[in-house]
Image (spheres, rainbow, N blue to C red):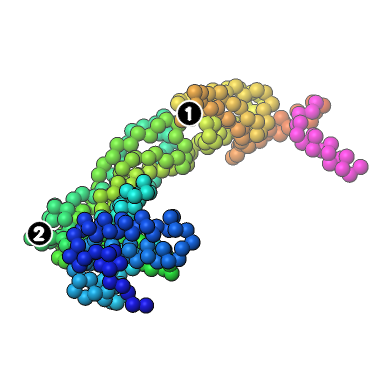
C-alpha cells in the first residue's frame, strides 16, 4: 500500500509552521482516538497515520529528510538512518504523550529527552566480631565512588572536541521497534540512552566522563545487630545514568565465628568443661561472658549435658529492652596421664563405691535395669 503524503494526512500546507502542525494533529487525534471510536478499524488506522505523520513532521531533522527524500528518508525499513529514532510507531503513546496528556487530562508520558536510569545498588560485606555486634561500634569502610573526569570536565569528549547529538536516535535516547501491531520503545543501542555521541572520546575516562575512585564512609553499626542484617547507605551506590539518581549502598553484616560463644538470636550458648571431681563434689566455676567473668555454682552430682542459665548475659537485640541469656552446657572431663599414685587412689575409690552398697551411678543403673527388663 502506497503511503500517503504526510502533509496531506494532517491536512496542512507543505510550509505549515510547527504550531499549525500541532493544531492539526490535535484535531485528528481528538477525532480518531480509539477511546472515542471503539471497534472502528478505520479510525484506528487514521489515528496511527496521523500520529506517525506528526512524529516525523514535528521533528525538524526528520521533516527535512522527508521533504528531501520522501518516505524513504524517514522509513526505518528503507535502510536510511538505521533504526530511525522514534520511527515506525504505530502504538499509542510516547512521542504523542505530551499532547495527549493535555487533551485527555494526564497519563501522558514525558516524551523525548535522554533515558534516565537509577544507578545500581552496591553491596559491601563487613565482617565483624560477636563483641562488636553486641556492643555496636563506629567504623570506616572504603567503597568505590565516581568522580567527574578532570581531563574532560565530565563531558567524555577529548579536550577541544565536543559531544554530538546521536544520529541513531536524534538525541531522544530511545528507538522504536515494531512488533506486529505493537511498537516497543527501547534504549538506543548507539548512545545507550544518553542521546549523545562522542566522536573523539577522552582518553583518561574512555568517554565515560567519570572516573572510578574510592571514598571513605563512616558507618555506625548499632548494638545488637545480627548476622545477615543490612545497613543502607542511601545514595552511595553506583551513579545514575544520564542524570538519574544514584543507587544505594548496602553494608551486609557478617559475624565471624566466635571461639567460645554461639549466638541464637539474643541468647548465647557456650560449653563449660568441668573436672569430674567438681561434677561429683560440687563447687564454683568461673564462666566467660561477653562483658567479663561470671560464676556458676555447680551442685554436687552434676551430670554431663546439664545446662545452666545466666540471666541477662546474652545480647540485647536491636529492638529489645532486655538482653537475652547465656546458656552454659556442661561437659565433664576425664583426667588423663595419671601417675601410679593417682591410679591407686582411683582404684581404692572405685572399691569404696562398690563396697558402700549405695547406688552412685544414676544413669548406668537405670540403663542396666532397662537391659535386664529387655532380656527377661
Ligand atoms: Zn542514540
Ligand atoms: Zn574524561
Quadrant position of the N terminus in the picture: bottom left
Tag shown at residue 159: 2
- Is 15 above or below relative to 326? below
| Residue 78 quadrant | bottom left
Q: Determine crowd level at label 1: few under 14, some 14-19, many 20+ residues with C-alpha closer than 10 A.
A: few
Point out which mark residue 319 bears. Answer: 1
- Measured from the top left, where is residue 22 in percent x and y? 25, 57
On the image, the x and y values in percent for residue 306 come to: 65, 31
Magenta segment includes 375: yes
Judged by depth in the image, the label closer to the viewer, 1 or 2, is 2
Q: Is residue 283 magenta?
A: no
Q: How many marks?
A: 2
Q: Nearer the viewer, residue 338 or 288?
A: 288
- Give the residue at x 39% y 46%: 125
| Residues shaded magenta | 358-376
In the image, what residue occupies the spot 60% across and 33% down? 329
Classify 179 as above or below 343.
below
Q: Position of residue 245 (x, y in %)?
A: 30, 46
Q: Which numbered tag is attached to residue 372?
A: none
Residue drawn at (29%, 36%) of the image: 218
Gap in Å between the C-alphas at discs 1 and 2?
55 Å
Pick whichever, 350 or 195, lies toward us: 195
Instruction: Give the residue displayed 54% in from the left and 31% down from the top.
Output: 267
The quadrant in which the C terminus is found is top right
Q: Secondary structure at mark 2?
A: loop
Predominant secondary structure in magenta? Answer: helix
- Tell me which label, 1 or 2, sits earlier in the chain: 2
- The x, y position of residue 195, in whole percent, is 24, 60
63 with respect to 370 (left or right): left
Amino acid at each position: 500500500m502506497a503511503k500517503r503524503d504526510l502533509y496531506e494526512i494532517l491536512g496542512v500546507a507543505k510550509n505549515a509552521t510547527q504550531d499549525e502542525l500541532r493544531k492539526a494533529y490535535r484535531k485528528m487525534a481528538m477525532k480518531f482516538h480509539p477511546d472515542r471510536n471503539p471497534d472502528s478499524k478505520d479510525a484506528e488506522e487514521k489515528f496511527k497515520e496521523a500520529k506517525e505523520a506528526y512524529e516525523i513532521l514535528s521533528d525538524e531533522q526528520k521533516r527535512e529528510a522527508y521533504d528531501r527524500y520522501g518516505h524513504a528518508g524517514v522509513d526505518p525499513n528503507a535502510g536510511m538512518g538505521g533504526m530511525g529514532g522514534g520511527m515506525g510507531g504505530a502504538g499509542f503513546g510516547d512521542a504523542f504523550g505530551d499532547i495527549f496528556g493535555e487533551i485527555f487530562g494526564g497519563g501522558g508520558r514525558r516524551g523525548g529527552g535522554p533515558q534516565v536510569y537509577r544507578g545500581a545498588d552496591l553491596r559491601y560485606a563487613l565482617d565483624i566480631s560477636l563483641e562488636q555486634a553486641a556492643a555496636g561500634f563506629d567504623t570506616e569502610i572504603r567503597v568505590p565512588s565516581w568522580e567527574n573526569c578532570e581531563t574532560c570536565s565530565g563531558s567524555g569528549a577529548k579536550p577541544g572536541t565536543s559531544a554530538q547529538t546521536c544520529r541513531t536516535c536524534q538525541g531522544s535516547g530511545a528507538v522504536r521497534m515494531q512488533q506486529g501491531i505493537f511498537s516497543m520503545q527501547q534504549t538506543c543501542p548507539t548512545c545507550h540512552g544518553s542521546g549523545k555521541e562522542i566522536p573523539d572520546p577522552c582518553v583518561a575516562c574512555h568517554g565515560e566522563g567519570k572516573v572510578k575512585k574510592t571514598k571513605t564512609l563512616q558507618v555506625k553499626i548499632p548494638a545488637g545487630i545480627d548476622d545477615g542484617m543490612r545497613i543502607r547507605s542511601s545514595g552511595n551506590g553506583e551513579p545514575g545514568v544520564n542524570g538519574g539518581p544514584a543507587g544505594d549502598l548496602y553494608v551486609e553484616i557478617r559475624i565471624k565465628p566466635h571461639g567460645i560463644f554461639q549466638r541464637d538470636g539474643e541468647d548465647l550458648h557456650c560449653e563449660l568443661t568441668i573436672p569430674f571431681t567438681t561434677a561429683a563434689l560440687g563447687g564454683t566455676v568461673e564462666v566467660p561472658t561477653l562483658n567479663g567473668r561470671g560464676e556458676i555454682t555447680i551442685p554436687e552430682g552434676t551430670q554431663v549435658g546439664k545446662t545452666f542459665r545466666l540471666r541477662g548475659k546474652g545480647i540485647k537485640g536491636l529492638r529489645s529492652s532486655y538482653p537475652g541469656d547465656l546458656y552454659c552446657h556442661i561437659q565433664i572431663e576425664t583426667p588423663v596421664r595419671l601417675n601410679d599414685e593417682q591410679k591407686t587412689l582411683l582404684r581404692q575409690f572405685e572399691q569404696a563405691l562398690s563396697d558402700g552398697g549405695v547406688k552412685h551411678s544414676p544413669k548406668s543403673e537405670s540403663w542396666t535395669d532397662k537391659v535386664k527388663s529387655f532380656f527377661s
